[in-house]
Amino acid sequence: MTLTVHPVTGLPEVTAGDDLVVLLAPALREIGARDGDVVVVTQKIVSKAEGRLVPDQDRAAAVEAETVRVVARREDLVIAETRHGFVCANAGVDASNVAAGFVALLPEDPDGSAERLRTGLSAALAADVAVVITDTFGRPWREGLVDAAIGVAGMPAIVDLRGSPDHTGRELEATVIALADQVAAAAGTVMAKTARVPVALARGVTWQGGAGRARDLIRAPQGDLFRESPMQSLHARRTIRSFGPGTVPRERVADAIAAACAAPAPHHTRPWAFVALDEAPAKRALLSAIAHAWRSDLRSDRIPEDVIELRIARSDAVLGRAPTLIVPFVRFEGAHPYPDAGRAGAEREMFLLAGGAAIQNLLLALHAQGYAACWISSTLFCQEETRAALGMDRGWYALGTVACGPTPGGGAAPRPRPPVDLDAVLRWS
């Protein structure tokens, strides 16, 4: 197979409302476009033709509007997921090769733009051509930019070779080729940003199977091992009190608890234990124990009945619907006495603080794996009942309950988090 890439030169500056078919067809006809060729077009001229330009002074607002999820942030640079599913710098908002004072946004529907362009060009050229719309993306762990496909029509975006033999006859197990990205990168070698070559024609690309879309290239969240930077995950984690259908696999819970045990603790100890409940009878037993404690005569003498019933209902609304409950415990054995501490109880407080750190690690680990979670304080107020329901001895002290499950459909419904006023919370000395 021989692959050739032909730059398309001499094109005029594209402005809003221009018909790209009318602009490109004569030059492609001169090159001799034919069946099976792939017309590769930069995102910038598509965005210009579709009027996707905004004033440069609105750049920050445009990045925010185009962002559905922040992956990482450092100073003014944001690595963000767009509503298309692309993860790129500043949500694809870019000032290169745009008139002074403006920035370009990605097309609203790059796959749709590619299909319209393919249909028009195929008719104008009397040739069945494919179209790939490209943009330049950075890559984790590697320097430099490379052209990638953000819109595809008339060819597969992905070629799945799993199950087919390699040249030795061994079955391929993980080989899925991003064909459209390969075409985009090859065309990028003749479409330099400084050369005013926004279009190329690739000839010799072969494929089997039907046409695909650039959205086929987007990795599903459940398969994304690098979904958030560690710093961003601290800001992105939210308390989510509702859950989607399904369960939390036990191995994911075990991973989260292992992360919880990485929290700091005094005297080289690990003063924690975690009881995880994902079976209905076990969860019902715990909720019954909590309700019984709240309804006991001792407590009802101090708290009005309607308040007790409201607390039980609120607790059940979250804990009773969560696929998995995790009850963290701390014990105070091994706490070193500090006679000169100046007050009693400081030794226990160290262990309680360590327990809080373990819970925060647990919540972050669940978030990092894509699960919704929240911390509920109920078991703090019924220690004996909780220990009895879960078979823990008197040396253990319950630190509330973490409820977790799949993120609800339509995205998380997090509790709002107030903005941080650093002037109020940070003091330098």
Image (cartoon, helix red, strand yellow):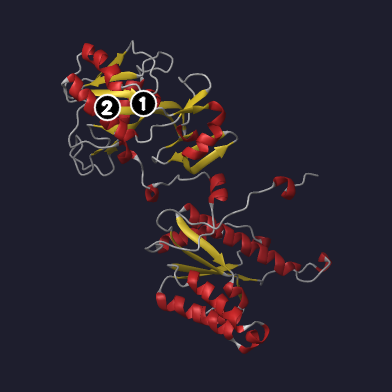
Q: Is residue 213 left or right of residue 351?
A: left
In front here: 404 or 326?
Answer: 404
Q: Is residue 233 above or below residue 311?
A: above
Which of the 4 image quarters holds residue 165?
top left
| Residue 101 image point, x, y percent | 53, 22
Q: Is residue 399 above or below residue 40?
A: below
Element assignment for label 1: helix
Separation of marks 2 and 1 at Cα, in angstroms: 10 Å
Residue behind mark 2: 117
Which of the 4 image quarters holds residue 396?
bottom right
Q: Residues within 10 Å of mark 2 (few under 14, many from 20)?
A: many
- Quarter occupied by the C terminus: top right
Q: Is residue 1 visible?
A: no
Residue ranking furthest to the front:
17
In primary-sequence order, the first of circles 2 and 1 is 1
Element assignment for label 2: helix
Q: Is residue 384 visible?
A: yes
Question: Residue, x 40% and y 38% (percent of image)?
Answer: 86
| Residue 313 image point, x, y percent | 52, 76
Q: Are marks 2 and 1 in contact (CB under 8 Å)?
A: yes
In front here: 398 or 172?
Answer: 398
| Residue 332 image point, x, y percent | 66, 71
Q: Amino acid at mark 2?
A: Leu
Q: Residues within 10 Å of mark 1 (few under 14, many from 20)?
A: many
Numbered badge on residue 46: 1
Q: Amino acid at mark 1?
A: Val
